[in-house]
Amino acid sequence: MILFGGILSIKAVTFLVFCVFAIAALGYLLGRITIKGVSLGTAGVFIVALLFGAILYTPLANQLKVGDASYVSNALKIVETLGLILFVTSVGFIAGPSFFGDLKKNFKSYILLGLLIIVIGGLACAGCTILDIKVFGRSPEEAGAMLVGLLSGSLTSTPAFSAAKATVTSDELEAIVAVGHGIAYLFGVVGVVLFVQLVPKMARANMEEERAKLSAANPETPSKLDGSEMELDPFGFCAFSIVAVLGMVIGCFKFGNFSLTTTGGCLILSLIFGHFSKIGKVSIMPPEATLKVFRELGLMLFLIGAGVAGGASFVKYFEWVYFIYGIVMTLVPMIIGYIFAKYVLKLNLLNNLGSICGGMTSTPALGTLISTAGTEKVAGAYASTYPIALVAVVIVSQVLIIIFR
């Protein structure tokens, strides 16, 4: 107790940073545990963050004595947003050189798959909503708000979550949307992470052959840099920061209730910068080593920020039936999308799974797939499908709210 009291006497910011690193350390240790070749990887950080949030979120908010729980909530949002910016901007830079060539070849496939996944998810949501109204007697408005929140959580989609909250008609319904999002988010992350590891094993895929197929479909694009360009700084931090700033600015623009958000803005700008690599004689492409570190650091911070807050909501509002609904809304579109991509679109395994990650708007799953596949090229399929899914999930969420209003 003396030690615990001493820790709590440290400045609030220092203690929160201490918690972030403690969660990261324990999470990576958990992620290293492998059962029959399957591990959580970086998603182990998310599990530890959820447990931390479930057990310690309220005591932490109360004991820091720096205001109410909104202080901790805001701090976690900063950690989550910083992580998301680092991750998606790195992914965009990495995918940028081959992105437009890959998109040109598979444009129709990526559009169809992104739309299919979201539409199937929306239909699953509508079916669960009708069941909830008929069986449990909830009002259409409340059931619709809860189930659309579950849909955004099952697809780990912040834009859909924001759009649903903006479309409902009262603060009470906004709170219900938030509860649904928190309940479904756990399986929304873990389910897709495990899926992209289990499918190659169930298919007995030879990863060396699959990487060769991916390279044949997405050939290496020659670098536009010849070594004579001026670097803004040795590690590429300046170019990275410029793209992040511009991406956030673009993400702020709204068209009705829709916006690209920080995620979409940073992803699109980094894809463009990564594609051109230089402006005149100035390099705007950070080194690969920097991008890999930022990608992993960003994913870690994102999972901690989202996981701690999600753990608090999960425990507080958990109901088994809502959790089941969330599982359905994660698994059904993902499985149908995979089958459609394999047998109808004829995508190779790694392009298929990369597109599934993009269609499910799953940032953590992409990190796991890169590790599983042993190549960064899967990010191209993710980046191509993600914008389609991003727009579609926002529209579908708003339509569902209006239907059940």
Image (cartoon, rainbow, N blue to C red):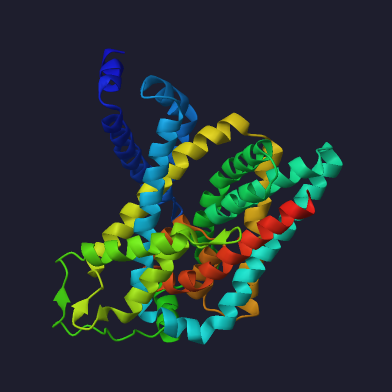
The reply to whether residue 44 is visible in this rendering is no
Q: How many badges with numbers are in the image?
A: 0
Q: Which residue is drawn at 61% across and 38% down?
A: 179
Could you tell me residue 82's position as x and y percent?
36, 50
Q: Quadrant of residue 159?
A: bottom right
Asked if residue 181 lies left or right of residue 50, the reply is right
Residue pictured at 37% horizontal, 42% vertical: 27
Q: Residue at x 59, y 82 (%)?
A: 108
| Residue 104 seen in the figure | yes
Q: In which quarter of the image is the N terminus?
A: top left
**Along the horizontal axis of the image, is 183 left or right of 378?**
right
Q: Which of 153 and 211 is in front in this view?
A: 153
When the figure is inspected, residue 128 is found, relative to residue 115, above or below; the finding is: above
* Residue nearest the observer in this picture, 62 or 23: 62
Say above or below: 384 vs 135: below
Residue at x-position 27% and y-position 58%: 293
In the rendered image, which quarter is residue 231 located in? bottom left
Q: Locate residue 361, reporting x and y percent.
A: 53, 60
Where in the figure is residue 393, as x and y percent of width and height? 62, 61
149 is higher (above) or lower (below) than 346: above
Q: Which residue lies furthest to the top in this view?
A: 2
Q: Which residue is at the front of the view, 204 or 87? A: 87
Q: In this view, does 52 lie above or below 355?
A: above
Q: Residue 127, percent across and down?
A: 78, 53
